[in-house]
Amino acid sequence: MLIIGIAGGTGSGKTTVVHQIMNELPETEVGIISQDSYYKETQNLSFDERALINFDHPRAIDFDLMVEHLIDLKEGKTIEQPVYSFVTHNRTQDTIVTHPRKVMIVEGILIFTHQVLREMFDVKIFVHADSDERLIRRLKRDISERGRDMEEVLNRYQSTLKPMHQQFIEPTKAFADIIIPNDKYNTVAIDVVRAVINQRIT
């Protein structure tokens, strides 16, 4: 199994890169694990308490479960990924049944901050985007998909997103094997990644 880690700041375009990589690959041979599914269980907290959690800090992520699930997949076992709701700030009762694949893509802003998880990646990709561009994308997404208002998104960006990006995410660019500047459609970088994958699965 080839495990690819794709990191980068919020709104950097990681999801776009994932789709670009998968576009020409057999669907049955590639799977995805999203860090967003692995925010820690917080049933013991009220909604107001959960809303105060710093979701851009590594301690908000259940990395132990991510590592455990990747190990299970490598051993040929099927896993059940948690499903997280950004509306309620909590895990739902649902899970996503995920089968082992020749290639597993793990994507998330903080996945390179955890050493054990990071060392499981055969290829590490960092998607870089200008901070203004990332803020615009975050605004659009959180307002349209997560029920936030502009003031809330901007406050969170200034108080947590930006400092957390500078403290935890940007430094992990140093671990990347490939850095993809996402200010335009970067066909060369995507083709390189596809070539590595095809070499493994053919």
Image: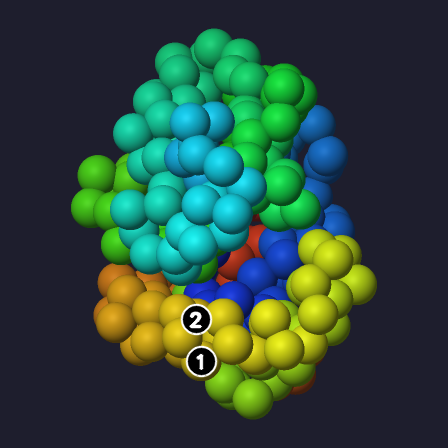
| Vertical position of residue 129 compared to residue 123: above or below | below
**Residue 181: percent from left, percent from top:** 52, 80
Q: Is residue 12 visible from the viewing direction of this image?
A: yes
At 70% across and 27% down in the image, what residue appears? Answer: 28
Mark 2 vs 1: CB contact within 8 A: yes
Q: CA distance from mark 2 to mark 1?
A: 6 Å
Q: Quadrant of residue 125?
A: bottom left
**Residue 158: percent from left, percent from top:** 44, 80
Left or right: 168, with 77 as reference point: left
What's the amino acid at mark 1? Gln
158 vs 140, nearest the viewer: 158
Q: How is the image coloured?
A: rainbow
| Vertical position of residue 172 compared to residue 34: above or below | below
**Residue 21: percent from left, percent from top:** 63, 54
- The residue wearing badge 1 is 158
Q: Secondary structure at mark 2?
A: helix
| Vertical position of residue 69 compared to residue 4: above or below | above
Q: Quadrant of residue 191?
A: bottom right
At 36% across and 26% down in the image, what residue appears? Answer: 65
**Which of pointers 2 and 1 indicates the residue nearer the eye?**
1
At 52% across and 16% down in the image, what residue appears? Answer: 79
> Extreme right residue here?
144
Residue 161's disc is 2
**Residue 6: percent from left, percent from top:** 46, 55
Quarter of the C terminus within the rendering:
top right
Quarter of the N terminus within the rendering:
top left
| Vertical position of residue 27 compared to residue 101: above or below | below
Q: Secondary structure at mark 1?
A: helix
189 vs 51, nearest the viewer: 51
Q: Is residue 137 visible from the viewing direction of this image?
A: no
Task: Give the crowd class for mark 1: few <14, some 14-19, many >=20 residues within 10 Å.
Answer: few
What's the amino acid at mark 2? Leu
